[in-house]
Image (tube, helix red, strand yellow):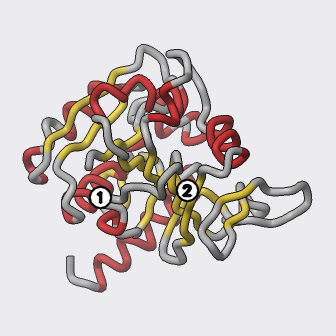
Amino acid sequence: MKAMILAAGLGERMRPLTDHTPKPLLRVGGVPLIEHHIRRLAAAGFHEVVINVSHLADQIVDDCGDGSRWGLSIDYSPEEEPLETAGGIHRALPLLGSGPFLVVNGDIWVEFDFGRLHGHGLTPGDLAYLVMVGNPPQHPQGDFLLDADGRVGHLPAGATGVTYSGVGVYSGEMFAAMKPGKLRLRPLLDEAISAGRLGGEFFAGQWEDVGTPERLAALDERVSAVAGADGR
């Protein structure tokens, strides 16, 4: 099973930090965000990773290289301009193979065990399987409903649901009909929900949308404190 890390965004909310450094290379506990993901993927048994790049792409390629120092291989999917999530995945499909693949947002912090999804074949007929988390303060209503059977549903107006973590398993079929170019992921997820073809699970562990310099600083302080206490 292959994995894809989404790393092509401009990081506009993180400016001025991202004026000269791509968001996935911002450091938490002294380590770039993207490297935390790569380490976890390697530990979970993933051997092939695809990273899409656009904004300050050379820095990411130079930093991550071919992946051999983590015991895996990295291929890159370049984008002349950021294509949004669905557009970026669609561009990378030739590198991702024919089976389901794991996708991880490059600008999140998560302590989820990717090994739980390694080899996840998806429920027959499903197009994707999403990992959900509790709603953060900046997003109190959430994105979707998740029922006791692990089915993802639309969130009615005024209701409170759960938040998509940025971690999920996808089938290439979900993107096969779209045209090349820029496209957000949400419309495809909504279509999958309407067709009854979207599953998921809830993760109660550590997760952070590193969306602002303030949230990055708070996360860095917390992770650094834990690492110091562990003697790392």
Mark 2: which secondary structure? strand
Q: Name the residue at 54% across, 29% down.
A: 84
- Residue 126 spot, x, y in % from top left: 53, 50
- Specify the quadrant of the image occupied by residue 36: bottom left
Measured in 3D between alpha carbons, the distance from the residue under mark 2 to the one under mark 1, in whole angstroms, is 26 Å
Q: Name the residue at 45% across, 45% down.
A: 170
Q: Residues within 10 Å of mark 1 (few under 14, many from 20)?
A: some
Mark number, residue 197: none
Q: Quick check: 230 above or below 23?
A: below
Amino acid under label 2?
A: Asp
Side of 27 relative to 134 (left or right): left
- Residue 81 spot, x, y in % from top left: 48, 17
Q: Which residue is mark 2?
A: 209
Q: Could you tell me if residue 10 is visible in this image?
A: no
* Residue lying farthest to the right in this orientation: 158
Side of 228 relative to 159 (left or right): left
Q: Which residue is mark 1?
A: 119
